[in-house]
Amino acid sequence: MLRVYHLLIGLILLILTPIVFKFVYPNSPTDKLQTNPVRQPKPVATLTQTNSASKPTEGNIWKSVLGKTATPPGWKVEPCEGNAPLLCVSSQGKVLGTVEMQVYPLANQPNFQKMLVAAGIPPGAKVDLQSPNYQTQVLTALNAWVADHYAVLSKDRQTAYGDRISFSPQPPQQVPFGMLHGIRYGFTGVQQGGKVYEENLGYVAFDGASLYVIQTAFDPAAKTGKFEKAENFESFESYLSAIVADLRLPK
């Protein structure tokens, strides 16, 4: 009988011990482990460069279309790292400037579609890059695009600078753009005292499906596609025409 009594007391103590422990030590480490969930490490955010006017499908397009490159002595030209559509121009390991290429699918360019129609190329027309007549029509549309581009830029500069800086566009020139026929264009912004404030250079071509636009500048307001020094921009300007002429386009 005594053994049964002792066994009963031991069983009661076994049941009550955890309850008493929790009451006496309400903030025990065991309780914390039970109530606080394990925190997972937060994913590391990655920073990527994008441009709202273009949605590249292959990363930096220069990596797939750049052909032979011509540069001033001691300079180097290669696609910039990352997905931004930039060509890096450097000397002795220092980037002197960049050249930007944007690709605009025709389906997203209603204004240029109208220019093609006005030039004699209706929607859905057969693309014949070898046809002299088709080439002439495309060049007519590209010249209209440049004229419209100049009008927009002139209005923009007039709003920003007023009479302090004059907008001086260059006459468009037909140039080879890889195996395509393109247009070279540009403009200069000159201060009243005659000092050059900005210089811009561009090339545009059309392959039947997309509009290709290449731009670079000496422009203090630009963020990409620019040279920091006017002398470097001017030194590279003529070499860029040779690079554009040797692009691997159309694909």
Image (cartoon, rainbow, N blue to C red):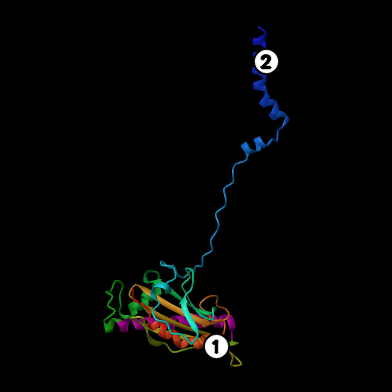
> Residue 238 location in percent, x, y?
45, 88
Residue receiving disc 1: 231
Image quarter where the N terminus lies is top right
Considering the numbered disc 1 on the image, is that residue within a helix, a strand or a loop?
A: helix
Q: Residue 9 got which mark?
A: 2
Considering the numbered disc 2 on the image, is that residue within a helix, a strand or a loop?
A: helix
Residue 157 figure quarter: bottom right
Query: Residue at position x 36%, y 76% from top?
Result: 114
Q: Amino acid at mark 1?
A: Glu
Q: Residue furthest bottom?
A: 194
Please tell me whether the stretch drawn in magenta is mainly helix, strand or loop: helix
Foreground residue, 2 or 162? 2
The part of the chain drawn in magenta is: 135-162
Query: Residue at position x 73%, y 29% from top?
Result: 24
Look at the image and say whether residue 139 sits in the magenta stretch: yes
**Mark 1 or mark 2: whose residue is earlier in sequence:** 2
Image quarter where the C terminus lies is bottom left
- Left or right, residue 103 beside residue 4: left
Q: CA distance from mark 1 to mark 2?
A: 98 Å
- Left or right, residue 99 beside residue 160: left
> Residue 217 location in percent, x, y?
51, 82
Between tags 1 and 2, which lies in front?
A: 2
> Residue 196 location in percent, x, y?
57, 89
